[in-house]
Image: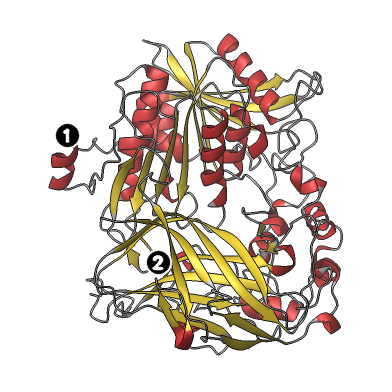
Amino acid sequence: MITHPKPALAVHCVIILSCLFRSALGAEPADELEPIDKEHLMAHYTKYEHMIAMRDGVKLLTSLYTPKDISEPYPMLLKRTPYGIRPYGVDNYPNPSGPLRAYGREKFIFVYQDVRGRNGSEGEFVHMRPHTSLEDNPNATNESTDTYDTIDWLVKHVPNNNGNVGMMGTSYPGFYTAAGMINSHPALKAASPQAPIADWFIGDDFHHNGAFYLAHAFRFLSRFGQTLEEPTRMRSLPFDYKTPDGYEFYLKLGPLANAEKRHFKGKINFWKELMEHGDYDAFWRARDILPHLNNVKTAVMTVGGWFDAEDLYGPLKIYESVEKKNPDGFNTLVMGPWAHGGWSRGDGDHLGHVRFHSKTSEFYRNNIELPFLKHFLKGAEDPNLPEAYVFETGTCQWRRYDAWPPEKAKDQSLYFRAHGKLSFQPPGADEGFEEYISDPSKPVPFIPNIAIGMTREHMLDDQRFASTRTDVMVYQSDVLAADVTLAGPITASLHVSTTGTDSDWVVKLIDVYSGDYPNPDPNPAGVNMGGYQQLVRGEAMRGKFRNSFEAPEPFTPGEVTKVEYVLPDAYHTFRQGHRIMVHVQSSWFPLIDRNPQKFTDIYKATESDFRKATQRIYHSAQAPSHLRLRMLTP
């Protein structure tokens, strides 16, 4: 909740770094700060290293970069990370990145810390360390207490600090930022969890609705999961796939159990834990941070990207949870047209072949993030941030809202109809079903090109390659006579049957461009944007979890069954002259591992468990498959 005055109604403010910006806000955008380089860092900052003791005696390695100019006290910006704070040693300076590079001329005290058990810090590293309540165990240590103890030491021992601390980080450091907000230290005045992990089984990184994100988990853990003898000096080596083609590599891998037998061989501990916890059991529930976001006393700005392939669920849910549990606090959400961490680097004017017609990342850094930090840490002018600062894709403009989803957004259903039609009108009684054969030996690829891992661009890739496959059901609207804007979560409500006893169900919402949509100019890649089928949102559900993630259930072969699940929020306008398209399929490979289509523990499945299945999608008055959207009407 934003505590400074807000407009009574959601305001559609066009903010695209043009004359429209001045008319909407009455001011020019902030000047772009010149980023610093290594030479500037060495000339204007002094580096220190400290081993800071936590309440249980474990010491965490912490690096500080403090301004040499001591004419005034400065706030501190803290980042806690499992990825290392190299280079180590007070005489070794990095090529600055992130906030240090972007805001080095603003003169903060920049603080970086290795979390427990990683690199230079003592203790045991635990992935997504579960939060233990101090009420239940007063002697507990967790990421919240480690953050508290670190901040307490910093404000008492770092010379020339002004007593204010900000905390920020992206991805895993975003999780540590969110955890650090719990029972906030009084000196923590601003926190910005960016692409934070919230739940690794329901929606972030390694699982989406129980479906295993194979390519991402394998790539990440094959490197990050390695144990190093001298972690402060050595870097883990990337896995050698011996091919650039991930589809080929993972298909030849066969059942998931072969990854351990052929490649990891006991060396990647968390991979083994993944394989041992195939349901939403106590192991995963303990790693859900959402129930614990209490007593957040700091101002919060949660940041995410609409096209973040890794952590889109996390920022949306953490914003929502903080809002519900801390209704009197300052809590704002920023969502832009970015891939994972795209707001912190580059211009942000495009992703893949899709262009956004403005430098969205620069705008965010100069007009949202930096003013937020300066206001709460340095006492600068209030930037009057809205509750939700969100970029509308399709029309490519920033909007400001008093709530997310916008209060004006209303539920509307988009129905599957016979003969591949898609309509806002429900089906009649005799419209029946369509069917396709899902073959695990020939799964539907998730991208039209060759890549070894999960690509950033797949979140808005052209889907024309998939629309021609016989194992992808395609539903398409008529040409739109007016713009159609969705703003919020998307619920897939499917009525299906399968000849197997388990199945994955993948739903993709697609914007089909007009045939005369202009190509980029210049166009060195020779891309043809006319008829481009842009993925707006895609998400999977592992069918056996349709009623419970804790207690999976088989399908009864041939029986019509309802499968309903929520896709992450989108904010997109389908323009007049475009069409809306929906795909339904049962594989998305190797983004998601192959479902054997037999009810079994997939992590222990053998080759003989995999089988073809005939899948039916029903669209009748009795079984109306549809998407439920949150729509904004003019």
Which quarter of the rendering shows the N terminus? top left
Q: Position of residue 35 (x, y in %)?
A: 35, 38
Give whichever of 68, 319 is nearer the camera.
319
Q: Earlier in the sequence, mark 2 or mark 1?
A: 1
SS type, badge 1: loop
SS category of the residue bearing label 2: loop
Residue 27: assigned label: 1
Specify the amino acid type for callout 1: Ala
Whether tag 2 and tag 1 are in contact, CB under 8 A, the answer is no
Quarter-wise, where is residue 232 in the image? Answer: top right
Hey, what amino acid is under mark 2? Gly
Towards the viewer: 484 or 336: 484
Instruction: Identify which residue is drawn at 17% across, 37% down.
Output: 28
Q: Is residue 36 visible?
A: no
Query: Could you tell me which quadrant the C terminus lies in?
Result: bottom left
Which residue occupies the foreground of this view, 607 or 158?
Answer: 607
Instruction: State the image coordinates of residue 589 (x, y, percent, origin top left).
Output: 62, 75
User: Left of 442 or right of it: where is 484?
Assistant: left
Give the residue displayed 54% in from the left and 80% down from the top: 620
Q: Quadrant of residue 88?
A: top right
